[in-house]
Amino acid sequence: MTEFEKMVSGQLYRADVAELQALRRRAAELCWRLEQLPPSQEAERSALLRELLGGAKGSFIINPGFRCDYGGNITIGANFYANYNCVILDCAPVTFGDNVFLGPNCSFYTAGHPLDASTRNSGLEFARPITVADDVWLGGNVAVLPGVTIGRGAVIGAGSVVSRDIPAGVVAVGNPCRPVRKIG
């Protein structure tokens, strides 16, 4: 099993191997090229993003400041909007449904490191997928941690740290982020 296969399947893997370094370099180059385009070149931005991402359905907007590790592990649904400075560490799959809106400075971290210092210092790490269902809105400065699923129609308040699953149809806030009420 390759380190890439270990990475996307949730096993411990080594990120310092040539295969993964090349994939990260490709993503960094595409992100850099994206940042060099003027705002008026919307078609070129969209084409570069479609080349970078693992899948993009329908129309979408990703504002400048976008960064990711690999890009190919990110799938976005139709009518996706990411405000400025979105960071997605996509060592595992990151899946966004339709009509997902991200405030500025939102971050999605699939990457994790072992708690045991000797294992961590050996260079091993792990990744867990993140899923954001349809019709979700995240306020600014939200961080979503490895392995989290956010349910359909949820709203995540600004500044929240989402460290566990959030059910559908709720407003959730805080650090750690917790549902505070149902919507509707």
Image (cartoon, grey):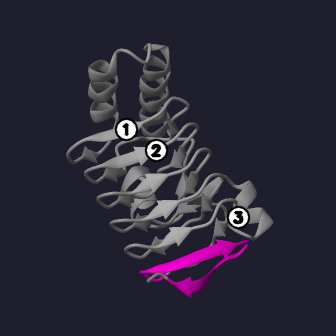
Q: Which of pointers 3 and 1 indicates the residue nearer the eye?
A: 1
Numbered circle sitting on residue 61: 1
Numbered circle sitting on residue 72: none
Residue 109 visible, this angle: yes
Task: Determine which residue is flagged by label 2.
Answer: 82
Residue at (57%, 86%) from the top-left corner? 181
Numbered circle sitting on residue 119: 3
Q: Earlier in the sequence, mark 2 or mark 3?
A: 2
Residues at marks 2 and 1 touching, judged by CB atoms closer than 8 Å: yes
> Is residue 134 toward the left or the right of residue 7 in the image?
left
Q: Identity of the amino acid at label 2?
A: Ala
Q: Between marks 2 and 1, how big is the CA–CA gap? A: 6 Å
SS for dot 2:
strand
Q: Between marks 2 and 3, how big is the CA–CA gap? A: 35 Å
User: Which quadrant would residue 132 be assigned to in this image?
Assistant: bottom left
> Is residue 163 toward the left or the right of residue 58 in the image?
right
Residue 171 belongs to magenta span = yes
Q: Identity of the amino acid at label 3?
A: Thr
Residue 39 coordinates in the image, percent (x, y)? 43, 18
Q: Taking 14 as reference, is 68 above or below it?
A: above
Residue 83 coordinates in the image, percent (x, y)? 51, 41
Residue 30 belongs to magenta span = no
* Magenta-drawn segment: 167-182
Q: Residue furthest right?
A: 117
Residue 82 coordinates in the image, percent (x, y)? 46, 44
Q: Taking 19 as reference, is 117 above or below it?
A: below
Q: As rendered, which of 120 and 38 lies closer to the eye?
A: 38
Q: Between marks 3 and 1, how big is the CA–CA gap? A: 40 Å
> Is residue 137 toward the left or the right of residue 160 in the image?
left
Q: Earlier in the sequence, mark 2 or mark 1?
A: 1
